Image (cartoon, helix red, strand yellow):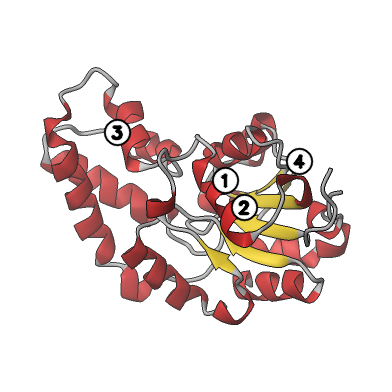
Amino acid sequence: MRTDKPAGVLFDVDGTLVDTTYLHTVSWWEALRQTDQPVPMAVVHRSIGMGSDKLLDHLLGPERDRDADSKLRDAHDTLYAEYWERLTPLPRAADLLRACAERGMRIVLATSASEPEVGALRRALAADDVIDTITSSADAEQSKPAPDILVAALEQSGLAAERVVFVGDSVWDVVAAGKLDIPCVGLTCGGTSRGELAGAGAVAVYDDPAALLGELAESPLARPRG
């Protein structure tokens, strides 16, 4: 086991640090409605955290006519972009990043958002001073629940899987981390329940970044691996 690399924390961003899960839900719901493929909003919500390719497979079936996929993605992106200037960090998200950095951990945002979306998320979070590495959709061939974006985050940050913890808000985050044997701390602020996150394999579950920050000293983030 490598122990010469610094410990770090990989963070999902959408729904974990910035309050966007339901904005994505509404945007996908409307995009699907516009193309006469309505899906109940609760079902859409349970798919958020996947990339658009896997999300559409999950919602519409893998045998569907894919000719409309690009139109659906474009519609979602256009609708979601209307919220960019109003994006809001979740409670004490930036404080959590800074507290982890003060403990000597590298802070990595492992997001599969597009480059323009990443810019909007960074502006909302306002914590660039402690962020070491940020990924984007261009860094992953496959989206979650595949672990590609986590692999990219590790490679770009120089961290080893044995020395990190991942923080996310969806079942898909937990599943992706599990494929690399990275422990995942779940947050319920994206709308996924404590039971669902724990059932998927989360090693601990908190309400939001503020709750995790309040118990940071006793959390998995305070026990670097290796």
Q: CA distance from mark 4 to mark 1?
A: 20 Å
CB under 8 Å between discs 1 and 2: yes
Callout 3 secondary element: helix
CB under 8 Å between discs 3 and 2: no
Q: Is residue 180 visible?
A: yes
The residue positioned 70% from the left and 39% from the top of the image is: 202
Q: For this rendering, which residue is in front, 188 or 56?
A: 56
The residue under label 1 is 151
Q: CA distance from mark 3 to mark 2?
A: 27 Å
The residue under label 2 is 154
The residue under label 3 is 56
Q: CA distance from mark 1 to mark 2?
A: 5 Å
Q: Earlier in the sequence, mark 4 or mark 3?
A: 3
Query: Which mark lies nearer to you, 2 or 4?
Result: 2
- Answer with left or right where residue 24 lies relative to residue 220: left
Q: Is residue 91 visible?
A: no
Q: Earlier in the sequence, mark 4 or mark 1?
A: 1
The residue under label 4 is 203
Relative vertical location of residue 83 with respect to residue 67 in this rendering, above or below:
below
The local crowd at label 3, few if under 14, some if 14 to 19, many if 20 or more residues have their Cα within 10 Å, is many
Q: For this rendering, which residue is in front, 202 or 164?
A: 164
